[in-house]
Image (cartoon, helix red, strand yellow):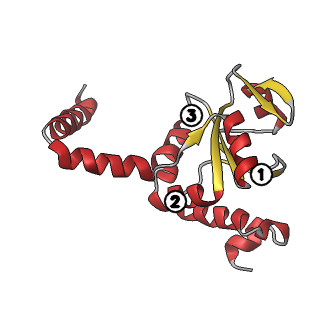
């Protein structure tokens, strides 16, 4: 119980702060929400990517994955990452254990089948595709925001066509 007490106090103080904040807090929250990454359903993301000629980022996650939550809270919540995603990408999440159906390249399958088909070996994993659904690459594991920004640049500038990711990240 003692180890949860600081969390309880923090939660109560945050709740009190939000309820007493008034319009200024509400205005600030609206700005924060609009700067966050906007996730779409997979099928919708693929349609939008084709229409807007944007790259696709697919975040593979599971409900039990701690590092998936950290990536949501730190990497995807980073304002620079959110801005880069909005500018050049359409983003979707796939639950690697879900039986919910999606359509990929004309084939209907469960999200879990798509996950296996992309050879996802752990969570989180991040898949990059072009606007037509062609796979550019997949990266397993948690990625910190500064590195993630470089990876987004690697894809959006089409450096992936001429350089290996490791060379790009190291400045070669």
Q: Position of residue 159 (x, y in %)?
A: 77, 70
Q: Label 1: few (<14), some or many (≥20) within 10 Å?
A: many
For mark 2, give the secondary structure: helix
Residue closer to the observer: 70 or 103: 103
Proximity of marks 1 and 2: CB atoms separated by less than 8 Å: no
Q: Position of residue 57 (x, y in %)?
A: 68, 48
Residue under pointer 3: 65
In percent of the image, x 51 and y 53: which residue is there? 75
Reading the chain from its start, which is encountered first: label 3 or label 1? Answer: 3
Quick check: 47 above or below 143? above
Q: CA distance from mark 3 to mark 1?
A: 28 Å
> Residue 131, which numbered label?
1
For mark 1, give the secondary structure: loop
Quick check: 112 above or below 44? above
In percent of the image, x 81 and y 39: which residue is there? 118
Q: Position of residue 91 (x, y in %)?
A: 63, 46
Quick check: 104 above or below 38? above
Residue under pointer 2: 83
Q: Position of residue 20 (x, y in %)?
A: 12, 39
Residue closer to the observer: 154 or 157: 157
Q: Label 3: few (<14), some or many (≥20) within 10 Å?
A: few
Reading the chain from its start, which is encountered first: label 3 or label 2? Answer: 3
For mark 3, give the secondary structure: loop
Q: Which image quarter is the N terminus in?
A: top left
Q: Using the rendered view, name the quadrant where residue 108 is placed.
A: top right
Q: Is residue 17 left or right of residue 66?
A: left
Q: Using the rendered view, name the quadrant where residue 17 is placed.
A: top left
Q: CA distance from mark 1 to mark 2?
A: 19 Å
């Amino acid at each position: 119980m003692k180890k949860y007490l600081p969390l309880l106090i923090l939660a109560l103080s945050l709740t009190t702060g939000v309820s007493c904040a008034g319009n200024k807090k509400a205005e600030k929250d609206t700005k924060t929400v609009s700067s966050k990454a906007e996730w779409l359903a997979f099928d919708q993301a693929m349609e939008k990517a084709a229409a807007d000629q944007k790259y696709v980022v697919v975040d593979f996650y599971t409900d039990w994955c701690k590092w998936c939550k950290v990536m949501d809270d730190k990497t995807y919540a980073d304002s620079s990452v959110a801005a880069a995603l909005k500018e050049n990408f359409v983003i979707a999440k796939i639950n690697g254990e879900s039986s919910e159906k999606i359509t990929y390249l004309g084939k209907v399958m469960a999200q879990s089948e798509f996950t296996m088909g992309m050879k996802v070996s752990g969570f989180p994993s991040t898949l990059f595709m072009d606007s037509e659904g062609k796979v550019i690459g997949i990266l397993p594991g948690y990625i910190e925001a500064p590195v993630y920004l470089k990876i987004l640049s690697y894809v959006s500038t089409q450096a992936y066509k001429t350089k290996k990711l490791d060379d790009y990240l190291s400045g070669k």
